[in-house]
Image (tube, grey):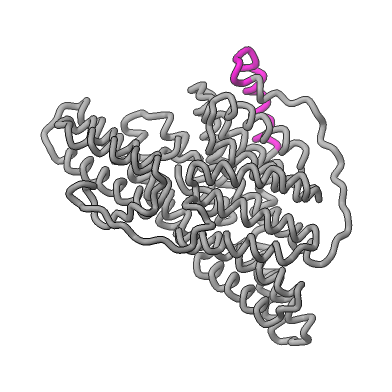
Amino acid sequence: MKKFISILFILFFVVGYSQNYADKKAYLVDSIDLSLLTPPELDYLNTELDKFKKSDNDTLKLYTLSLIVERIYEAQIWTKYNRLMLEMAEIGLQKEVNDSLKKVYLKYKAFATNNIGFYYDNTGRPDLAIKNFLAAEKIYEQIDNKTELANIFNNMAHTYMNLGNYEKSIELYQKSYDLRIELKDEDAIANSLNNIGVVYGSTGKFEKSLEYYEQSLSIRKKLKNDFGIASNMMNIGIIYLKMNKPNTALDYLTKGQKIHEKINNKQGVAACLKNIGIAYSYQGKYDKTIENIQQALDIYSEINDKEGVSNCHRFIGMAQLKTNQTKEGEQSLLKSYEIGKEIGYPFLIETAARELYLFYKEKNQSNKALQFHELYIQMKDSVESTATKQLLLQNDYKKDIEEQLEKDSNQKEIKVLETENELLKEKVSSQSTLVYSLYTVIGLLLIILGITYFKTKKG
């Protein structure tokens, strides 16, 4: 789908631009700001809308809208066409039609509903995200669409992971993976490989994580899937950060950023910028840290990605403290905490509370230090209680995957899944206080940012 890792598109270098609202008669929906689109996107939109207007067939019209929703990344635009598609499908279902056409209307209703869930997940409303995902799942089961069911399970898994419910997340990723193996869908298999890499990375198995990311990247390069390639590049960069190799990380992150810019994926651009900033902090270049993460923050704010905003405030605050910007650093950390509390994500609350505890402890503000230390321990225990369950399930999860890969080893697209190397021992090196803090935080970041959304939209 469109929004995935941070914020996307519209070159972040361009801060100011004039708004150019389109005529509803020409563009079918209200308040379309054409200045948000790249020239190729605008040409594509005009071409598809021309097809829509010339057709009297609801099936073709709905299909055309689905392409617009899938290929336009700007949330302020695709969400409006998604709503139009949902309304058309619901109107169609009220008509007396044959079973075949009814199935078409149900398909696009589910498609639009899933996209709404994806939007809510990326804007910090997991309750509404899950509600819409479940509604779409019910429809896809009714019409027996296994491809989209796999995507729904994948999306819900991401939401539950953000909420700290790793047991439920693993269960849903497994269901998604099983369906994709059955369907022999290479692009979807690459997505699952990426997600398996996240599981390994989140438990400290960095070499194993890289194996799966590289396998996923190989498939996506063959398929020329720019979105997937960029996502893999960023995920690989994050792993190299965890392995304390910032130069290698910067190389991958910069490549990922350029591809996301090319396809106008604002969220991807923002995610890469944020991680580029973190890489600079490993090198002690805190000015560059603040510069890059501030650019990411601006994009996250623009697309209303509260999770991204919270993360950026935290990292900016940590860098500001390292450059003796004490007041600014405290305010940035407090903003991160407040947003995490607002959207109810335990990992955001935990990591912000930890940094605030360390800050107030250093400043000898005992009451505040105690307050945030207790909150940090509370959130940490909450996350770790579900993480323990995750580790118990992961052995069975890994075993099931490897058994399936062995059975399908004669299939070309599955061969990339075979693994050869044993997990190398992790090397732990001492770093400065900031780097140590970032090292701890990135483990959770990897879970959130690494999972590639394979939502129906951006298939």
Front-most of 385 and 54?
Answer: 54
Q: Is residue 52 above or below residue 324?
A: above
Q: Quadrant of residue 409?
A: top right
Q: Which residues are magenta?
A: 395-414
Instruction: Name the residue furthest top.
Output: 410
Q: Position of residue 449 (x, y in %)?
A: 60, 50
Quadrant holding the C terminus: top left
Q: Position of residue 319 (x, y in %)?
A: 72, 69
Q: Residue at x 74, y 78 (%)?
A: 359
Front-most of 177 and 82?
Answer: 82
Q: Is residue 239 above or below residue 128?
A: above
Q: Residue at x 59, y 36 (%)?
A: 229
Q: Position of residue 37 (x, y in %)?
A: 39, 49
Instruction: Name the residue furthest left.
Output: 96
Residue 336 placement, left or right of 205:
left
- Residue 16 magenta-drawn? no
Q: Position of residue 308 (x, y in %)?
A: 55, 60
Q: Is residue 280 above or below residue 191?
A: below
Can the viewer see residue 7?
yes
Quadrant holding the N terminus: top left
Residue 428 placement, left or right of 5:
right
